[in-house]
Amino acid sequence: MHRLVGSLRFLLLCSCLGVAASAQQPDSAPIVLHAARLLQVDTGTLLQPGEVLIEGERIRAVGASVEHPQGAKIIDLGNATLLPGLIDAHVHLFLHPGAEDLQTVVESVPWRTILAEQAAKDDLLAGFTAERDMGTEGAGSADTAVRNAIDQGLILGPRLRISGNAIDILGGHEDANRYNPAQHVLSNADYANSAEQMVEVMREQHKEGSDFAKIYETGPDRMIDGVLHSPYQYTAAQLTAAVEEARRMGTTVGVHAMGEPGTLYAAEAGVASIDHATQLSDETMRLMKEKGIFAVPTFTIFDYFAHHRESQDQAAAEAALLDYKIAEFKKQVAAGVPFAVGSDVGPFPHGTQARELTLMVRYGMTPLAVLQADMINGAKLLGWAGQIGELKPGYFADIIAVPGNPLNDISVVEHVKFVMKNGAVARQ
Ligand SMILES: [Zn+2]
C-alpha cells in the first residue's frame, strides 16, 4: 500500500511537471527572427537586415538572410536590433527595495523565495537571460530551488549561477553588528574565520547546490579626505585557500572588494571577479590583466544610493563615493582592466538594471566595449563561454531585440521589446 501511494504520487508529480514545462519549452517548429539590424558583438559588425534561424534551444544560422525552412514560424521585429541576451554578473534575487538587514530579520525564507521568483521573472522580461546571483543574504541555499525550478521550466527566469549565502568574518562587513547583542540577530552571511573554516563552509554550500562562492573581502567603507578606506577581511593566503578549494570542486570565487589592500589580495589569490572594484592599485590592475580577473563596477547601486538615502548627509557621502569611483574607473579603463557588467540589483527594483550599461558608457567606455564586457566577458565569468553571449550557430538561443541602434545610443538596452531564452519566446 505504501509503495502504491508512493508511485501514484510520483506519476502525479511527473504529469504536473510535463504540463508546466511545456509552457517554457522551445517551439517544436523552427523559428526565424527578422529585424532591421543584428549586432555581431565580437567584431562590432552590424548586419542590415539581420536574421537568426532557431531550432529547438539552439541557434542554427545567422546572417543578413538565413534559410526559411518549411513550416518555420517567422517573427518580424521591424525597426529593431537583434542582440544576444543581456548578462548581469551581480544580482540579488532575494533582495528588494527597502532596508536590507530588516528583510532578513522580518521576512521568512519561504516568503523571500516567492519574491525571488518574481524578481527572476522581472529580470528575464527586461532582457537578462543569464545572471550570477551574488548571495541570498540570509536565505541560505534557497536559491538552489529557484535555479532548479527555472531550469526545469516551472518558472520564468534567467540561466543562473548561484552562491547561496555569502561568506564573511565574525563581526565583518555583512554581520548584524548594529543590533542589541542580547537579541542575537543572525548574520546575512555564513561565518568563516580561518582558511580551514572557509573550506568547510564552501563544501557545505556546494553540497546544498551552490555554483560558486561569494566572499566579502572588504568593508565597511569610509571616505576620508576624498579617498576611500575599506579594511580587508581575509589575507591573500586565506583567499588562496578558497580559490584552490573552488578549483578542486570545479567552481570559482567572486569577491566583494571595494579597495586596497583587499583588492590586491583577491587578485593575488586569482579570484574570478572583483566586484565593486572601486580602488585598484597599479599592481592589482596588472595582475587582473595578466590573470584575466574581471572587475565588476556595479555603478547602478552607487548611483541609486546617492539619490535614495534617508538623510542629506548620507546622500552626500554616497555622492562623494560615486565621484571617487568614477575617477578611479576612468583610470581602470585606460589601464585595460577586463570588465564584466553587474548591477547589484535587488536594493533597487528588479528589471531596471540595464541602466548599468548606460552608466558604464557615460563614465568612459564605448558602447561596443560595454556590450562585449556584458555578453562575451559575462559568459566567460559565468562559465558559459562559447554557449551564450554571442549570436552564432550552435549557441543557445538567448536573443533580445532593442529599438534603435545600441552603438549610437546604449540606453536602448533599457527598453528591450523581445526576449527569447533557450529557444522559447518569453516576451514579444
Ligand atoms: Zn551585491
Image: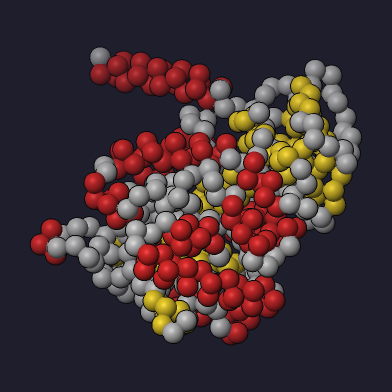
Give left or right: position of 372 versus 158.
Answer: right
- At horizontal 48% and vertical 44% (from top left) the residue drawn is 350
Residue 362 location (% of width, % of height): 66, 62
- At horizontal 48% and vertical 29% (from top left) the residue drawn is 154
Whether residue 247 appears in this view of the structure is no
Whether residue 74 appears in this view of the structure is yes
Q: Quadrant of the C terminus?
A: top right
Q: Quadrant of the N terminus?
A: top left
Is residue 369 or residue 55 the one in the foreground? 369
- At horizontal 27% and vertical 52% (from top left) the residue drawn is 102
Residue 167 location (% of width, % of height): 36, 63
Is residue 229 or residue 244 the one in the foreground? 229
Q: Is residue 291 above or below residue 151?
A: below
Residue 169 location (% of width, % of height): 31, 70
Q: Quadrant of residue 366?
A: bottom right
Is residue 251 or residue 227 the one in the foreground? 227
Q: Quadrant of residue 392?
A: top right
Residue 26 location (% of width, % of height): 64, 28
Q: Is residue 71 above or below residue 67?
A: above
